[in-house]
Every structure is written in C-alpha cells, then in structure tokens.
Amino acid sequence: MQKKALIQELRDRLNAKLAQLQNTKSSLIESRESDGKSSAGDKYETGVEMIQQEMERTQGQIDQIERQKDVLNRISMTPNTLIGEGSLVLTDKANYFIGIPYGELKLETGNVYCISSASPIGELLTGTQTGETISFRDQKITVTQIL
C-alpha cells in the first residue's frame, strides 16, 4: 500500500465532492433568484429562507472539504518512526491513515480507515511506533508498519 496513491485517491474524491457541492450551490442561487421574481408574501419569504439555510449548509460542507484538502497538502511523504499526522499505519487488525476524518476507503490494495488524530483510536495510535501494541475497545492492536 502506498501513501502517495492513498492521498491522491483522497484528493480525487474530495475534488469530486467539491464539484458536486458547487453545482448544488449554483442551483440554489438560481432558485433563490427565480423565487425573488415572484413575491407571494409569507410563502415567498419562507421559500427564500429555506434556500438560504440550504446554501449555508452547502457552504459549510465546501469549507470543510477545503480544510481537508489543505491538511492533505501539508502531509509529508517522508516515513516517520513515530505515528503522527500524515502517517499511514498498518496494524494486525486494520490499516489507518492519520490525517482527515474521511471514513473507510476501499482500495484495490486493501481498505484504509481515514481518521483524525483527535479520534479515539487516532489519539491512541499517535506517538506509538512499529511493534508497539495499543488497547482499543477490549482489543489489542499491534502496529506492524508506519509509512
């Protein structure tokens, strides 16, 4: 499993999600503007308010993806001896990428859980090294490799 390929896959997926959200935002702007041409009192204002709330939610998601892309851009490709931000951690139970909280990523080379260092297992893994064992939910997990 290669860290560079994993990060590129994450970038591609984030960019696809970003494009989808930007299209949604454009559609919402069009809806708001077309609703603005017909003013039917309270019904109009309620519709515009709902569109505005949806635009704010969409913008929040766009901002979150931009932050995640920034985190990915700051990750070093140099392997570390201690697990930290940007580490691809192979264990006897599962593989973890410590960087952004994306969830499970299914790749041809295997599955990887993309997690934040602030997540419960991320906190336990941070600072450990190859050969060390952590306990998570009554389960022993041994770090086999850090990329």
Image (spheres, rainbow, N blue to C red):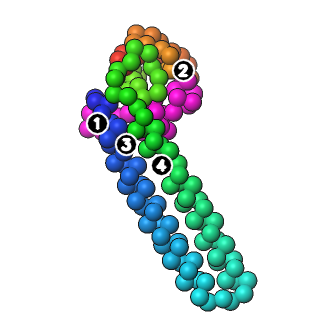
Q: Can you see residue 27?
A: yes
| Residue 106 among magenta residues | yes
Helix, strand or loop at mark 4: helix
Q: Report the residue marked by disc 3.
A: 10
Amino acid carrying mark 3 in the image: Leu
Q: Image quadrant for the N terminus?
A: top left
Q: Which residues are magenta?
A: 96-123
**Which amino acid type corresponds to the residue marked 4 in the rendered image?**
Glu
Residue under label 2, please give it. 124
Which mark is first along the chain, 1 or 3? 1
**Residue type beneath disc 2:** Leu
Q: Secondary structure at mark 1?
A: helix
Residue under label 4, please give it: 66
Q: In whole angstroms, how far apart are the C-alphas of marks 1 and 4?
A: 20 Å
- The tag on residue 52 is none
Separation (CA) of disc 3 from disc 1: 9 Å
Q: Is residue 92 visible?
A: no
Mark 3, secondary structure of its residue: helix
Mark 4 and mark 3: Cα distance apart in space = 12 Å
